[in-house]
Image (cartoon, helix red, strand yellow):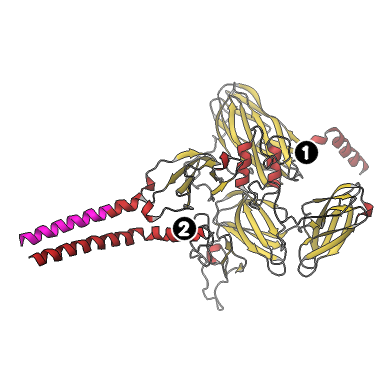
Amino acid sequence: MRCNAIFTKTAFFRLILGLAIFSSASFFAPQFAFAVSGTVDISGTVPGCGDGVIQSGEECDGSNLNGKSCSTQGFSGGTLSCNSNCAFNTSQCTSAPSSGGGGGGGGGGGYTAPATGVTFSGRAYPKSTITVLKDAQIAATTVADANANFSVSVTGISSGNYIFSVYSEDGKGIRSSLLTFPVSVTSGATTNIGGVFIAPTIAVDKSEVKRGDNIAIFGQSVPSGEITIAVSSEEEFFGKTAADPNGAYLYNFDTTQLDMGQHFTKSKAAKEGAISSFSKAISFLVGTKNIAAELSRVVTKGDMNNDRRVNLVDFSIAAYWYKRSSPPASVDLNGDGKVDLIDFSIMAFYWTG
Amino acid sequence: MKKVLFIFLSIAFLFPYHLFAAEIFYDADTRKVKANTEFEVGVFLNAESENINAIEGILRFPADILEFKELNDGNSIVNFWVERPSRRVENEIIFSGITPGGFVGKRGLIFRITFLAKNEGNGKLEMQNIKALLNDGNGTAADISVSPLKIIITSQDLSLPPKKETKDQEPPESFKPEIARDPAIFDGKWFLVFATQDKGLGIGRYEIKETRSRIFGLFPKWISAESPYALRDQKLKSYIFVKAVDKAGNVRIEKILPRNPLRWYENYENWIIIILGLVIAYAIKKFLWKRHLKK
């Protein structure tokens, strides 16, 4: 009996322990997963994009495509992949219409209703990243091929009016200006916007150039494209150069013909009859000495929290200071002592999403 | 040919503003409406050949004959409102917003307003302090013209179709709220930013819920919020839910996982489960022990 009681007590404690372990293991498994992710957090990786788990706002994560393929994205075939910002990369999807059956009047592929969406295709810079904004927020990114051609789709949207914008970032991290497209999206149809020609990127090697010295104007565009450089002065000067097979171009401009003071330069590209719009205009000073320019990798104007992006976070910071007194200098973009519509307009120009 | 050129240049000289300026316009030049009926007015931007990325103004309406009913900013070309269109005083609607990258087009909807024609009479919708800025990186003001909208409220039966009821069954667009921190606002505290669009009747409101509970997180109440929103949980251990509700009541909820999740032993829910487990185990033990004694 005593022995029996000892056995029962032992069994009881085992039972308690077993239940505790069971409840911990079964109920807390996801919690332990968070704890693991917390450890990753400490090492510098924030849970989110790149952790292989699809979370809010992510279309995919690494190799996890959430069961989607090119065909679910409105294409007929090809390979769907995931970009580093956890948006689908549809550049390897093919959009040829699925052919109906074989010869002899046989059946064939069934009809798949097209997804509601918009497809952009055109030219950027070789191997550059193209970002598509939907109503000013990042909707998709892709990478252009070696010939600077790209195609990217935004699907899974409602019918209605949208403002889409497209921009690219060259190999040096310089961003193009935004190309915007007001689009009316129809339910059950894919709107194709082809022939997009993103303006070249542009930079100069000197922020101040000694009058009479050359200033190098450079950037990236389509391979072997014809680049037109415009330099503003009392009269505008134009020059032409050709981009190399990587799309890089360089133009040495003789400043002898310029007056002392601030000047602006911009560029546009042409290839096979297509012409891009002008790039952003960047400024340089013609003076008495040469000062090397810092490559403007980092977005300056409008990037209030210094994350190299101009987006909703920056807008919200500015909105907080809207019509309030004594705003910080980082928020008052035109330095007039207040945050008003002009500051928001400047921010909207430098927007990256 | 010379004559045509002369006429064109003469008009250009006399009315330069209207020939080349951007324009704010309405659905029609004149609206004749039967008293005691509701009608809608769309306010549009014609950017002409300009690229406009910011717009603001005040729309003044005759409050003696019109009663403001509602405002719809669904499908607007304005992506972010600095001041969401709203009635500031009885007869004024103020608005201010931006379109990143700019708008180039002839007919960009800014918003729609619904009025009730409450009394017979005549009046005008007029824009004041209107400002449109170019997408040039400097916020340069664009030339802009506005023509008033004449309103005639009559007792006559105009046999016009009633105001079209817009069915909005689509939820707001998906969006990605972001957590950020900046010394410029909220004393450097963590805050949340969020914004989305609705292609139907427009966004009605946003609500937020912060909870450290995974299971009992259903119970805390939603609270109305605007972006930017200072987070209550500055340790970022909470799940954050942002609900966008459109004016038809359709809902889109987005969730952000905690950046610094609780350790398992920090979550009281886990202890509740353990205690429940122990209680159940104790009850089973008691039950088995009693059966054993009976034998």
| Of residues A188 and A320, the one drawn nearer to the viewer in this rendering | A320
Taking depth in this image into account, of A344 and A76 the one nearest to the observer is A344
Q: Relative to B62, say whether A12 is above or below.
A: below
Residue B21 disc label: 1
Question: Which quadrant, please, contains the N terminus of chain A?
Answer: bottom left
The rendered magenta stretch, by its main secondary structure, is classed as helix
**Which residue position is annotated with label 2?**
A38
Q: Are marks 1 and 2 in contact (CB under 8 Å)?
A: no
Q: Is residue B171 visible?
A: yes
Residue type at numbered disc 1:
Ala
**Element under disc 2:** helix
Q: Residue at x 69, y 67 (%)?
A: A127
Mark 1, secondary structure of its residue: loop
Q: Chain of mark 1?
A: B
Name the image quarter holding residue A200: bottom right
Residue B4 vertical placement versus A47 (above, below): above
Q: Residues within 10 Å of mark 2 (few under 14, many from 20)?
A: many
Residue at x 27%, y 52% (from the top left corner): B275
Residue A156, position as x, y percentages in the image: 54, 56
Q: Is residue A169 above or below residue A305?
A: below
Q: In the shown orientation, is residue B115 left or right of residue B143?
A: left
Please name whichever residue, B200 or B40, is drawn nearer the observer in this view of the structure.
B200
**Residue A323 falls in image quadrant:** top right
Chain part drawn in magenta = B275-295
Q: Amino acid at mark 2?
A: Gly
